[in-house]
Amino acid sequence: MLEARITEDMKNAMRAGDKETLSAIRMLKSAIKDKQIELRHDTTDEDVMALIGKLVKQRREAAKQYAEAGRADLEAKELKEADIYSAYLPEPMSQADLQALLEAVMAETGAAGMKDMGRVMAAMRDKAAGRADMGQLSALVKARLSA
């Protein structure tokens, strides 16, 4: 399980004295605990991966804002945390893999135009869970359906 791996990595960071990694993993563990309370049951690996994806996105957006404000120190901290969290996500899909998946989903759903975008996005989200940026995926689907 992913949670067990996160706990083990937290212990290793403690032993190594890596304060940045330890802090990031503790925040992750806290977010997982909050999610368990919200769901009222233990989280699955899919729940944890979705949560980690959300945290990575938040960290990257915060880093972008810090960069715009000229705060390189805080930008670096946010990017470091995003990298730590990203290690728990599956390998992202390549552009070619996304394109092939999109073609398969379109054939499967019979999508022909923009009116089918919701159906295509729902299927793509399920099949590319945690392995693709949804904004990038949405742009790809729009471009393909409007062509």
Image (cartoon, helix red, strand yellow):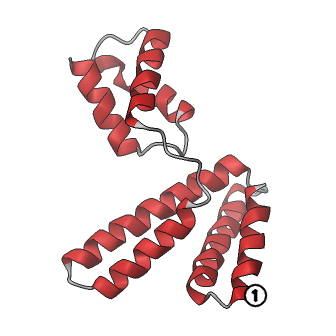
Q: Is residue 1 above or below residue 135?
A: below
Task: Identify the element where label 1 is drawn.
Answer: helix
Q: Is residue 108 above or below residue 56?
A: above
Residue toward you, 96 or 69? 96
Quarter assignment of residue 42? bottom right
Pointer 1: what residue? 15
Image location of residue 137, percent across then percent down: 37, 37
- Please state if 17 lies on the left or on the right of 1 as rendered: left
Image location of residue 125, percent across then percent down: 49, 35
Residue toward you, 121 or 88? 88
Question: Which residue shows up at 34% across the image and 87% down it?
Answer: 73
Q: Amino acid at mark 1?
A: Arg
Question: Which residue shows up at 34% across the image and 65% down it?
Answer: 61
- Please state if 72 lies on the left or on the right of 100 as rendered: left
Question: Which residue shows up at 41% across the image and 46% down it?
Answer: 133
Q: Is residue 88 above or below residue 93?
A: below
